Image (cartoon, helix red, strand yellow):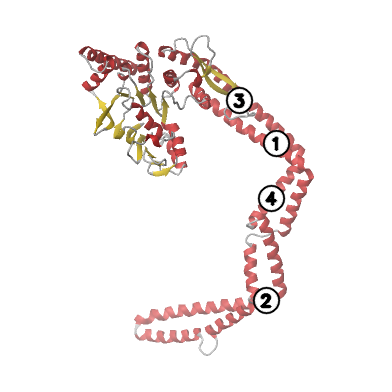
């Protein structure tokens, strides 16, 4: 839901902020007051292309900020995180800047972003329906999903997607088996050579690291022996051995401890240190006794190390990786050796997958055909009161191109409309124009939109060119739609505005030689006066006010009736 919209320096708007509520929000005002600028601003925060010509004369940039309230489980939060953006606290704040010099900037929840990401978010935030620009329902790529949602095909569609995955996996495996068959013995010999190479060396875990350590020891044998002899001598040999000196100190401190018991623990500590040094001496002596600097052993280590290093350059980086490659080669070789049986099993698996997909897709196709026969009359029924009295709406199902096992099923869907008798049905984007197309979008939304709140639906002059009973029908359908979704509507008709939950008057003022567009929320008598003006011209009269009050009462009664139903 759109909570607030702030616009600065956009065309005739210098600085204004508007708070919108749930339900139907209408913008009214005289022609040229700037109502469509608000729609343009929403288009910009939904990712539409910006133009520096929109920047107010004398300003260096235009700024549009919109705050949207998100549902706790809104999928937009996941999309924001996937794009590296802060998901916020169930609030999405979009800031779009247009520079008079031609550059621009996008901020999403305070983080810099791109128009491309903004456009991606905008597809889920705002659905614009104006005189010349429409989003969402016109695109044939959405029609199949809309038909499925209308028909309640979630389980059938999921079954098709699962069957598609199984069939495609079987198809890919069989293709790999046939590829192996074409390679034949050549591939088998490569695999056998891989096995001979890896199993022949057969490196043990961490063996290369051990060999490198042993090699370093053997290469530095003389230095190691010299350092060991010096260390052992310092501990227990020579003129002043450390262990003997420590032992002497230990005896003297023990004697002191007998005189002053407070010093006795120090003797214990000296004894512990002496024992540690004796253990270190014994360990070093044992290490020296085990040393083997046989040149033949160094040569053997060098040869083994070089062999393992060569192997791991190709199959590493670790010994485990090399053995993994050998295991894979063994499995592939077993498949080649038993290729005929593997291919036969693969063909059987593909046949099962094909049958499973065909069965699931047939069920979905049947349900789609049934839903299409219901959807056409349902849309036509909504179009009739909207000045499409004899219109014919069709859902055309055609085979999906591009091969079999498509996860969305075997067909594509497109919405067609024949606006008048005797005319051929054409894609809805080419079957109507201007206000007609806006009213067509309104009928589609009324029939197709689900119960969960989603995008902000924006209708710019959906009532263009209509009056009387058609205007009443437009207002009633906008109100029905607004019971489930937030709707913004630019209108010139009081029959539409009377259904609003929030009414905003757009007007222009001239101050200091500059034109300023303002938006004023209307309630109570102000709203009655605005409806009266819309009914009777520039000046409201007692009669037009009375008619306006009647319109509001009728709209309120219609709302109560919808609530009871």
Quadrant of the rendered image containing residue 65: top left
Q: Residue at left 32%, top 32%?
A: 12
Q: Is residue 220 visible?
A: yes
Q: In front here: 468 or 168?
A: 468
210 lies above or below 456: below
Q: Of callouts 3 and 2, which one flags the residue occurring earlier in the amino acid sequence?
A: 2
- Mark 4 = which residue? 327
- Mark 2 = which residue? 293
In the image, is 463 to the left or to the right of 158? left
Q: Of callouts 3 and 1, which one flags the residue occurring earlier in the amino acid sequence?
A: 1
Quarter of the N terminus within the rendering: top left
Q: Secondary structure at mark 1?
A: helix
Q: Secondary structure at mark 3?
A: loop
Q: In front here: 207 or 245?
A: 207
Q: Residue at left 63%, top 59%?
A: 205
Q: Of callouts 3 and 4, which one flags the residue occurring earlier in the amino acid sequence?
A: 4
Q: Of callouts 1 and 4, which one flags the residue occurring earlier in the amino acid sequence?
A: 1
Number of residues whose C-alpha sits closer than 10 Å to that of mark 1, classed few (under 14), some (14–19) or many (20 or more) = many
Q: In front here: 316 or 143?
A: 143
Q: Looking at the image, is mark 3 or mark 2 nearer the viewer?
A: 3
Q: Is residue 78 visible?
A: no
Q: Kindly report the distance in space between the C-alpha atoms of the residues bearing marks 3 and 1.
A: 24 Å
Q: Of callouts 2 and 4, which one flags the residue occurring earlier in the amino acid sequence?
A: 2
Q: Of callouts 1 and 2, which one flags the residue occurring earlier in the amino acid sequence?
A: 1
Q: Kindly report the distance in space between the C-alpha atoms of the residues bearing marks 1 and 4.
A: 21 Å
Q: Looking at the image, is mark 1 or mark 4 nearer the viewer?
A: 1
**Tally of numbered discs:** 4
> What x and y, as percent, mark residue 210?
63, 66
- Mark 1 = which residue? 174
Q: Residue furthest front?
A: 513
6 lies above or below 297: above
- Mark 3 = which residue? 400
């Amino acid at each position: 839901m759109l909570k607030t919209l702030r616009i600065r320096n956009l065309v005739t708007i210098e600085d204004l902020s508007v708070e919108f509520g749930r339900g139907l929000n209408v913008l009214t005002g005289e022609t040229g007051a700037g109502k469509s600028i608000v729609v343009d601003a929403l288009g910009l925060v939904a990712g539409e292309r910006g133009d520096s010509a929109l920047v107010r004369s004398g300003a260096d940039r235009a700024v549009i900020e919109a705050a949207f309230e998100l549902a706790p489980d809104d999928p937009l939060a996941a999309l924001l995180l996937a794009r590296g953006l802060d998901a916020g606290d169930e609030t999405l704040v979009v800031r779009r800047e247009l520079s008079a010099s031609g550059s621009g900037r996008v901020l999403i929840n305070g983080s810099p972003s791109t128009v491309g990401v903004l456009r991606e978010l905008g597809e889920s935030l705002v659905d614009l329906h104006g005189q010349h620009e429409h989003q969402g329902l016109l695109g044939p790529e959405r029609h199949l999903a809309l038909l499925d949602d209308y028909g309640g095909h979630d389980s059938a569609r999921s079954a098709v997607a699962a069957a598609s995955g199984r069939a495609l996996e079987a198809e890919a495996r069989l293709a790999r088996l046939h590829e192996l068959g074409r390679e034949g013995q050549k591939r088998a010999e490569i695999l056998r050579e891989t096995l001979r190479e890896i199993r022949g060396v057969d490196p043990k875990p961490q063996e290369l690291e051990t060999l490198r350590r042993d090699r370093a020891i053997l290469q530095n044998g003389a230095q190691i022996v010299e350092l060991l002899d010096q260390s052992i001598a310092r501990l227990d040999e020579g003129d002043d051995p450390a262990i003997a000196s420590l032992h002497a100190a230990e005896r003297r401190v023990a004697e002191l401890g007998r005189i002053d018991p407070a010093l006795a623990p120090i003797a214990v500590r000296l004894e512990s240190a002496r024992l540690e040094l004796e253990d270190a001496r014994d360990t070093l002596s044992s290490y020296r006794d085990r040393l083997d600097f046989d040149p033949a052993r160094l040569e053997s280590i060098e040869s083994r190390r070089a062999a393992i290093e060569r192997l791991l350059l190709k199959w590493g980086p670790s010994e485990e990786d090399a053995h993994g490659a050998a295991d894979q080669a063994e499995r592939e070789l077993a498949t080649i050796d038993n290729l005929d049986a593997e291919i036969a099993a693969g063909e059987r698996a593909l046949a099962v997958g094909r049958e499973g997909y065909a069965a699931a897709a047939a069920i979905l196709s049947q349900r789609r055909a049934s839903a299409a026969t219901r959807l056409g009359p349902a849309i036509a029924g909504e179009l009739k009161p909207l000045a499409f009295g004899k219109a014919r709406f069709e859902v055309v199902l055609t085979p999906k191109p591009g091969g079999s096992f498509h996860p969305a099923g075997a067909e594509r869907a497109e919405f067609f409309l024949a606006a008048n008798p005797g005319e051929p049905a054409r894609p809805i984007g080419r079957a109507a124009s201007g206000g007609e197309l806006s009213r067509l979008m309104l009928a589609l939304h009324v029939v197709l939109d689900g119960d969960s709140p989603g995008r902000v639906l924006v209708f710019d002059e959906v009532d263009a060119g209509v009056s009387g009973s058609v205007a009443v029908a437009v207002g009633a359908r906008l109100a029905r739609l607004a019971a489930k979704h937030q709707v913004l509507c630019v209108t010139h008709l009081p029959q539409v505005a009377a259904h609003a939950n929030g009414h905003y008057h757009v007007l222009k003022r001239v101050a200091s030689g500059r034109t300023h567009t303002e938006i004023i929320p209307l309630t109570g008598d102000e709203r009655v006066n605005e409806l009266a003006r819309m009914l009777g011209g520039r000046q409201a009269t007692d009669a037009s006010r009375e008619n306006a009050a009647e319109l509001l009462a009728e709209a309120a009664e219609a709302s109560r009736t919808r609530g009871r139903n």
